[in-house]
């Protein structure tokens, strides 16, 4: 009698801090900032990594972390929404790794307040809320 082991595996990276400076203006003198804490979890056909010790199908967690940074950089200096960033992560992992069927991305944005100097908003000085 053969018994097949059914596993549900989910793995990835949590607490990835992504901080991006968005530059605009004629000489890029006006800055905006985006800080996002990222959790990116992958699910798919990875059972044989548990049953046979074959990790070739597992995307390393440091690769997940570095991909979070690379996608943010790829989006460029223009100001972007965190939802757009999250969808770019999902599209990347689903498009590049055919054995991954589900990607869960949780994003938490930290707000920064622009500081003033001489009663005017400063071009590139901020304080965290």
Image (tube, rainbow, N blue to C red):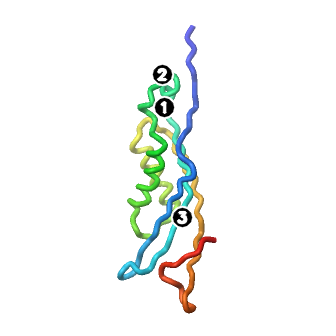
Q: Residue at x 50, y 65 (%)?
A: 81
Vertical side of 53 occupied by 113: above or below: below
Q: Residue at x 54, y 50 (%)?
A: 105
Q: Which residue is mark 3?
A: 35
Give the camera-side residue of 107 and 20. 20
Q: Secondary structure at mark 2?
A: loop
Q: Viewed as shown, does residue 64 lie left or right of 119? A: left
Frontmost of labels 1 and 2 is 2
**Which quarter of the rendering shows the N terminus?**
top right
Closer to the chain start, of discs 1 and 2, is: 1
Tell which residue pokes out farthest to the top in this image: 1
Q: Residue at x 48, y 49 (%)?
A: 65
Frontmost of labels 3 and 1 is 3
Q: Residues within 10 Å of mark 2 (few under 14, many from 20)?
A: few
Q: Position of residue 83 (x, y in %)?
A: 52, 60
Q: Image quadrant of residue 108?
A: bottom right
Q: Residues within 10 Å of mark 3 (few under 14, many from 20)?
A: some
Q: Secondary structure at mark 3?
A: strand
Q: Residue at x 41, y 40 (%)?
A: 97
Q: Which residue is mark 2?
A: 52
Q: Secondary structure at mark 1?
A: loop
Tell which residue pokes out farthest to the right in this image: 129
Q: Which residue is mark 1?
A: 45
Vertical side of 122 occupied by 68: above or below: above
């Amino acid at each position: 009698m053969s018994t097949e082991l059914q596993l549900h595996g989910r793995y990835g990276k949590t607490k990835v801090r992504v901080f991006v400076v968005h530059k605009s203006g004629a000489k890029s003198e006006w800055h905006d900032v985006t800080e996002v804490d990222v959790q990116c979890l992958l699910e798919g056909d990875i059972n044989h990594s548990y049953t046979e010790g074959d990790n070739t199908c597992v995307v390393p967690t440091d690769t997940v972390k570095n991909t979070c940074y690379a996608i943010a950089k790829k989006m460029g200096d223009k100001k972007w929404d965190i939802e757009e960033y999250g969808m770019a992560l999902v599209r990347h992992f689903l498009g590049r790794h055919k054995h991954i069927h589900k990607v869960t991305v949780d994003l938490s944005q930290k707000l920064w307040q622009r500081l003033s100097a001489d009663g005017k908003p400063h071009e590139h000085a901020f304080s965290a809320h």
